[in-house]
Image: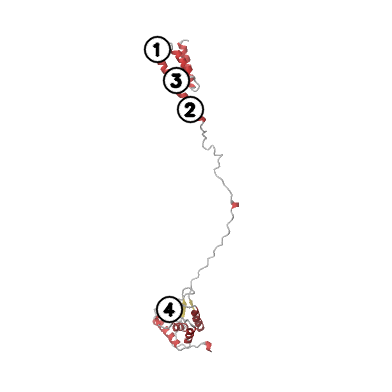
């Protein structure tokens, strides 16, 4: 076989090996190169053999890269495009639990009671009511020791109401209230300290003298205030116990 024929055959085999490096027979290709350069001078043989070995090395590199890529692809999961499983995956879920929930009982609306302003209690006091109030205060044991604490003391207080001195007590209370024009009303406790009268005298004088009494605070409060009577006060007050008629 002439050298030209070997060179043409070698070029054809080389192109085929470059197209399909995975299936190329590199050993067979190297033997064909040896046969082709055997008839050449030694310096030329070395030059051609060096170039051939370089190209064979490149083929080996391409072949190994292709084989490695095939091996990686064999153990690599497929890459699915975005939204590929959107029709297979549940995104939301709605559960109707109305049959499992009991309805709440109706709430009763609270009726707000209108708060009425507290008003003072002012009314004329009769003799019978005055004596009944003295007995009630004695039964409730009011503090400060100002009310009678025994039956004998209570009878003494009630007997005072029939004496002539009641008019004097009333005049004393009325005169003090008239003298202190800037103070039209005063608490019963303070009036006791100002007039220096015994508690029983002051209490009966206020109740039987027509003075206006006003209880302030709650129902059980002991804060009682005294005001001058609206009508002109007589110099002498005569009255009798209707129980003796």
Say if residue 172 shows up in the picture. Answer: yes
Comparing marks 1 and 4, which lies closer to the viewer? 1
What is the x, y in percent for residue 16? Answer: 49, 19
Distance of mark 1 from mark 3, alpha carbons?
Answer: 21 Å
Closest to the observer: 68 or 133? Answer: 68
Q: For mark 4, what is the residue?
A: 189
Q: Secondary structure at mark 1?
A: helix
Alpha-carbon distance for marks 1 and 2? Answer: 38 Å
Which residue is label 3 attached to?
Answer: 56
Q: Position of residue 118 (x, y in %)?
A: 48, 72
Residue topped by disc 1: 42
Its colouring scheme is secondary structure
Q: Are marks 2 and 4 in contact (CB under 8 Å)?
A: no
Q: Which mark sits nearer the N-terminus, 1 or 3?
A: 1
Disc 2 element: helix
Where is residue 195, by image quadrant?
bottom left
Q: Which residue is mark 2?
A: 68
């Amino acid at each position: 076989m002439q050298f030209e024929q070997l060179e043409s055959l070698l070029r054809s085999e080389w192109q085929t090996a470059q197209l399909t490096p995975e299936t190329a027979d590199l050993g067979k290709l190297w033997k064909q190169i040896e046969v082709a350069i055997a008839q050449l001078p030694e310096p030329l043989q070395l030059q051609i053999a060096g170039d051939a070995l370089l190209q064979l090395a490149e083929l080996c590199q391409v072949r190994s890269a292709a084989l490695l890529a095939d091996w990686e692809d064999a153990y690599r999961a497929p890459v699915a495009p975005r939204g590929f499983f959107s029709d297979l995956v549940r995104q939301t879920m709605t559960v109707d639990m109305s049959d499992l929930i009991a309805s709440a009982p109706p709430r009763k609306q609270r009726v707000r009671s209108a708060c009425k302003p507290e008003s003072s209690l002012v009314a004329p006091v009769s003799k019978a009511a005055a004596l009944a109030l003295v007995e009630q205060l004695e039964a409730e044991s009011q503090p400060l020791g100002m009310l009678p604490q025994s039956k004998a003391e209570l009878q003494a207080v009630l007997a005072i109401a029939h004496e002539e001195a009641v008019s004097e007590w009333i005049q004393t209370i009325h005169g003090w209230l008239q003298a202190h024009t800037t103070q039209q009303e005063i608490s019963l406790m303070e009036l006791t300290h100002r007039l220096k009268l015994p508690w029983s005298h002051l209490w009966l004088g206020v109740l039987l003298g027509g003075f206006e009494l006003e209880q302030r605070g709650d129902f059980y409060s002991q804060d009682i205030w005294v005001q001058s009577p609206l009508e002109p006060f007589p110099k002498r007050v005569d009255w009798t116990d209707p129980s003796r008629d």
